[in-house]
Image: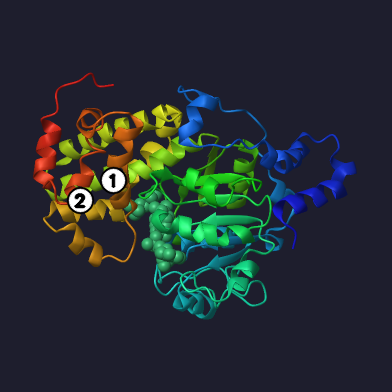
């Protein structure tokens, strides 16, 4: 099976005479050239290349290379992560008819999906389309185990010929796994991340982490980021969902959007991956705070005020890093924040709610099997934000009281009540 770039290249050559004058054909060339043109991006050097005031969104064609030249059943997609969201993403692509290879570490999940078309551990009440499989025919992943990988060849075959890699693992385990799989991802194949948070050890966002693992040095590839209000369970229920895909190259974002889009899954695009990534990570902290306020019975006035001010803090961080306020008012910003702060399915909100009811973090974590990314991200943010602002925690707290108050509560240094009192005691300021 050919890689994304090879496929595009061969299709391009075959169709050359037919599409010479077709403007959308430019997209193929853009794809091929993307890796060469992709700049090295990181929060640290962002100001040098783009300045502090955000960035222009180039207006380009939104491409449909896959749907135009390929039938979905000929396109292989590899989804890394057999938790709730990996399962949901497999369903979205599988329903479109793509060949989806789900890479998971748990043997029971492999067997469950192969035998019953269900993930026995996550969202087990839902079946997966037949095009989602772990099969010796297409990819022999069944012996694959991330932790005790005896058979690297299974990773190799799972990624062989893949044309899109979707990453759906908790942020804190992502580096280890991505480093492991990176050598097997075909050249030029895009990686789409769905994970939301900051890595505690490095204080880095997923776009930096991906760049360091799967798109480093002479091995550049398009990196894209999916975010927005999208509970895995509601996707599995086939309820209407709208998300955004961010990629520095808008054409590639458009191609991925076209691959995902269906009558129940609406996908918008943007080049502002910084805004999308910052919002996706920070809204989880705000959701913990909102859940806490609810658990404490503080009333809707308090919760609405908290969420609104949380959005303002989130937007200021994003703008500081070069993201756009437009993104922050979009699906990945307020959209996902509303869902996570008010939606009963949110794991982050639930952690906050239980804290607000008086449980300890330890009790909460030992009794939940799914990841609440805000817990780790809150910790990373109290270390990272004052440092990046070149100030002390106490000074930064005045500007970002919500984002910086959650970690001390999670660590038991403040009670939820003391955290709330601290917020209310902040000096009055201009709203924005
Ligand atoms: N569940 C949801 O509704 C949504 C989740 N996300 C994001 O997707 C990411 C993944 O979340 P979920 O799938 O919900 O988490 P989850 O808790 O449902 O599943 C996590 C999966 O990661 C696997 N895993 C953990 N450590 C691993 C390791 N070292 N090696 C290999 N696999 C490992 C677990 O076995 C499990 O299958 C998170 O960043 C989350 O914020 C994004 C949108 C919605
Ligand atoms: O990000 C999400 C929905 O968009 C999921 O939020 P939780 O991780 O809080 O459940």
Q: Nearer the viewer, residue 56 or 122?
A: 56
Q: Which residue lies furthest to the right in this view?
A: 17
Res. 410 mark: 2
What residue is drawn where x is 20% and y is 20%? Answer: 429
What residue is drawn where x is 66% and y is 72%? Answer: 138
Name the image quarter holding the N terminus. bottom right
Relative to 172, is 50 on the left or the right?
right
Location of residue 71 (image quadrant):
bottom right
Is the residue under label 2 in contact with that under label 1 (CB below 8 Å)? yes
Name the image quarter holding the C terminus. top left
Residue density around tag 2, few if under 14, some if 14–19, many if 20 or more, within 10 Å: many
All told, the count of numbered labels is: 2
Mark 1 secondary-structure assignment: helix
Q: Nearer the viewer, residue 129 or 422?
A: 422
Residue 393, image x and y in percent? 23, 34
Mark 2 secondary-structure assignment: helix
Query: Which one is earlier in the sequence, the residue at label 1 or at label 2?
Result: 1
The colour scheme of the drawn protein is: rainbow
Residue 90, image x and y in percent? 53, 62
Res. 204 mark: none
Residue 87, image x and y in percent? 47, 64
Instruction: Determine which residue is flagged by label 1.
Output: 378
- Considering only vertical position in the picture, is 5 above or below 127? above
Location of residue 423 (image quadrant):
top left
Relative to 414, is 249 on the left or the right?
right
What residue is drawn where x is 48% and y is 74%? Answer: 148
Q: Residue furthest top?
A: 430
What residue is drawn where x is 11% and y is 55%? Answer: 358
Q: Does residue 122 appear anywhere in the picture?
A: yes
Residue 98, image x and y in percent? 63, 61
Residue density around tag 1, few if under 14, some if 14–19, many if 20 or more, within 10 Å: many
């Amino acid at each position: 099976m050919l890689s994304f770039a090879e496929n595009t290249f061969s299709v391009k050559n075959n169709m050359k005479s037919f599409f010479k004058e077709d403007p959308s054909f430019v997209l193929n060339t853009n794809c091929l050239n993307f890796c060469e043109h992709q700049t090295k991006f990181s929060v640290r050097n962002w100001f040098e290349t783009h300045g502090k005031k955000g960035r222009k969104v180039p207006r380009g064609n939104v491409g449909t290379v896959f749907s135009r030249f390929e039938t979905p059943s000929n396109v292989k997609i590899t989804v890394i992560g057999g938790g709730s969201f990996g399962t949901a993403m497999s369903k979205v692509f599988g329903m479109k008819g793509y060949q989806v290879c789900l890479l998971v570490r748990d043997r029971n999940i492999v067997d469950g999906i192969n035998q019953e078309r269900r993930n026995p551990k996550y969202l087990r009440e839902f079946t997966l389309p037949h095009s989602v499989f772990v099969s010796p025919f297409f990819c022999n992943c069944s012996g694959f185990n991330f932790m005790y990988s005896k058979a690297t060849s299974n990773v190799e075959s799972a990624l062989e010929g893949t044309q899109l890699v979707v990453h759906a693992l908790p942020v804190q385990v992502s580096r280890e796994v991505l480093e492991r799989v990176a050598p097997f991802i075909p050249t030029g194949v895009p990686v789409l991340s769905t994970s939301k948070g900051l890595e505690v050890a490095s204080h880095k966002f997923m776009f930096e982490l991906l760049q360091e693992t799967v798109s480093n040095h002479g091995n550049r590839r398009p990196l894209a980021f999916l975010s927005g209000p999208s509970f895995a369970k509601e996707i599995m229920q086939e309820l209407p969902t709208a998300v955004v895909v961010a990629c520095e190259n808008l054409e590639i974002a458009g191609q991925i959007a076209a691959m995902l889009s269906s009558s129940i899954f609406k996908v918008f695009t943007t080049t502002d991956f910084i805004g999308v990534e910052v919002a996706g990570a920070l809204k989880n902290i705000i959701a913990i705070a909102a859940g806490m306020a609810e658990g404490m019975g503080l009333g809707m006035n308090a919760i609405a005020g908290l969420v609104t001010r949380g959005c303002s803090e989130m937007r200021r961080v994003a703008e500081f890093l070069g993201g756009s306020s437009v993104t922050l008012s979009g699906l990945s910003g307020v959209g996902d924040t509303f869902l996570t702060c008010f939606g009963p399915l949110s794991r982050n909100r639930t952690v906050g709610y239980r804290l607000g009811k008086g449980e300890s973090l330890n009790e909460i974590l030992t009794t939940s099997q799914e990841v609440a990314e805000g817990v780790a991200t809150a910790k990373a943010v109290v270390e990272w934000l004052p440092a990046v602002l070149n100030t002390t925690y106490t000074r930064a707290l005045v500007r970002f009281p919500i984002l910086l108050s959650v970690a001390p509560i999670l660590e038991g240094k403040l009670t939820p009540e003391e955290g709330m009192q601290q917020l209310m005691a902040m000096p009055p300021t201009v709203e924005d």
